[in-house]
């Protein structure tokens, strides 16, 4: 079958694969084998982060007034602010990353790897090279920022627990669907003509 499909057809298959990956991740919140145990739920483990980063995530709507207080420490229901030795304000987040998502009005029922949606939107067909010996379609992330995030999610693991969220690839069931789609496409779009004499 090597060399059977041309570049355009191969790129179209690649785009279908990207759609399958996005749907599985965003709509179903499912990850591939090799992902960390518990990858399908947002962390509730408390952690610390810089105040400016939390304010950026939450649009300054939760703890702006606390940061303006004169005291070095402020404690609320979800956060505890404290001043580091260097004078920077940090936040202890009691409910973990899940609490930040809740306060931002984001879905926490499943892990979808989306805050803004850029990560999954950036996933695309990077190249579809075709010659008489082989066809190679490369799927990945276009931007350097999302390539870095992909390395964290796919290989290194995110956060202190190094949680991996593998999405790049297909399950056996998804491969079967792609095979059926290709067959259906061919049957619908290809016609065979016998010349009439």
Image: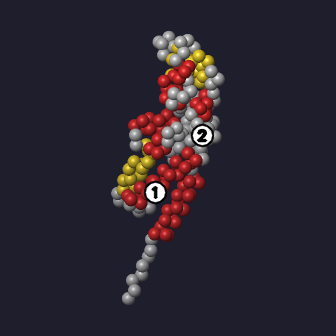
Numbered circles on residues, count:
2
Residue 89, given in percent of the width and then of the height, sits at: 51, 17
The disc placed on residue 107 is: 2
Residue 172, given in percent of the width and then of the height, sits at: 57, 52
Q: Decide which of tag 2 and tag 1 comes sooner along the chain.
A: 1
Residue 83, given in percent of the width and then of the height, sits at: 53, 14
Quadrant (top left/top right/bottom left/bottom right) for the C terminus? bottom left
Residue at 60% over, 40% down: 107
Residue at 39% over, 48% down: 126
26 lies left or right of 121: right
Residue at 59% over, 32% down: 103
Q: Identify the colour scheme used.
A: secondary structure
Q: Which residue is mark 1?
A: 13
Residue 112, given in percent of the width and then of the height, sits at: 56, 41
Quadrant (top left/top right/bottom left/bottom right) for the N terminus? bottom left
Circle 2 or circle 1, nearest the eye = 2
**SS at mark 1 in the image:** helix
**SS at mark 2 in the image:** loop
Q: Is residue 87 visible?
A: yes
Local crowd at mark 1 within 10 Å, few (<14), some, or many (≥20)? Answer: many
Q: Is residue 10 above or below residue 149?
A: below
| Residue furthest left as drawn | 131
Q: Is residue 3 visible?
A: no
The disc placed on residue 82 is: none
**Mark 1 and mark 2 in contact (Cβ < 8 Å)?**
no
């Amino acid at each position: 079958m090597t060399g059977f499909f041309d570049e355009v057809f191969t790129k179209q298959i690649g785009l279908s694969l990207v759609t399958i990956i996005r749907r599985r991740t965003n709509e179903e919140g499912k990850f591939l084998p090799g992902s960390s145990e518990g990858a399908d739920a947002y962390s509730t483990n408390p952690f610390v982060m810089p105040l400016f980063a939390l304010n950026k995530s939450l649009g300054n709507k939760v703890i702006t007034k606390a940061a303006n207080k004169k005291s070095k420490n402020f404690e609320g229901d979800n956060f505890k602010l404290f001043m580091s030795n260097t004078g920077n304000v940090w936040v202890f987040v009691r409910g973990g990353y899940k609490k930040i998502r809740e306060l931002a009005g984001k879905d926490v029922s499943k892990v979808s790897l989306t805050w803004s949606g850029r990560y999954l939107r950036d996933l695309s067909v990077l190249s579809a090279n075709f010659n008489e010996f082989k066809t190679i379609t490369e799927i990945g992330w276009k931007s350097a920022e999302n390539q870095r995030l992909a390395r964290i999610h796919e290989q290194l693991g995110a956060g202190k627990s190094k949680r991996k969220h593998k999405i790049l690839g297909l399950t056996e069931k998804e491969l079967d669907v792609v095979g059926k789609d290709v067959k259906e496409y061919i049957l619908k779009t290809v016609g065979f003509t016998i010349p009439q004499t």
